[in-house]
Amino acid sequence: MGKDEPILYELAAVCRAVADRNRSRALRVLLSRKDEALSVGELAKILKISQSLTSINMKILKAVGVVDSRKDGNHILYRINEQAIARYWKIGFDLYDKMFKPCPYGFECMECPAKKTCA
């Protein structure tokens, strides 16, 4: 397994999680309210979907790390995990660089000043 493969599996899991329309909408709501933590009920009302479906979706987003949660009495409050979002954004750009930009050293990694493999 190459050094990038675990990261690629992790990024693929995040992509699968956010590919769902309701989950991506929930992320957009949380991103637009970075300073707030919202309950499942509040999110369900905004998204116009059931609380049970919202709860399931938020658990999936939490499992891949893009949202954080905390308990407040009988409610679970969710907020965006900005560090995780920034990390996945960087991984995506790094992946783009490796996949679509030509290697100036012709994949002769020993000649690369960084001595890193990018293939």
Image (cartoon, grey):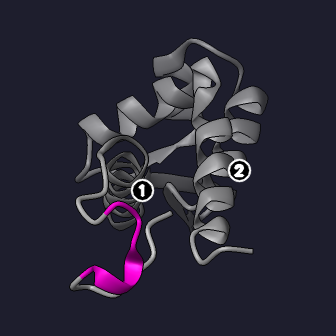
- Of discs 1 and 2, which sits in the foreground? 1
Q: Is residue 97 visible?
A: yes
Residue 50: horizontal and vertical position, in percent? 71, 20
- Rounded to the nearest whole Å, what is the CA distance between mark 1 and mark 2? 19 Å
Q: Is residue 78 above or below residue 111?
A: above
Q: Residue at x 23, y 59 (%)?
A: 104
Q: Is residue 5 above or below residue 80?
A: below
Dots 1, 2 in contact, CB < 8 A? no
Q: Quadrant of residue 96?
A: top left
Which residue is nearer to you in this view: 69 or 63?
63
Residue at the disc numbered 1: 88
Badge count: 2
Residue at the disc numbered 2: 59
Which residue is nearer to you in this view: 57 or 113?
113
Residue 31: horizontal and vertical position, in percent? 31, 40
Q: Residue at x 51, y 54 (%)?
A: 77
**Which quadrant holds the N terminus?**
bottom right
Residue 80: horizontal and vertical position, in percent? 40, 53
Amino acid type at mark 2: Lys
Residue 5: horizontal and vertical position, in percent? 66, 66
Q: Residue at x 60, y 22 (%)?
A: 22
Amino acid type at mark 1: Tyr
Mark 2 neighbour density, 10 Å: few (under 14) some (14–19) many (20 or more): some
The magenta span reads 106-112
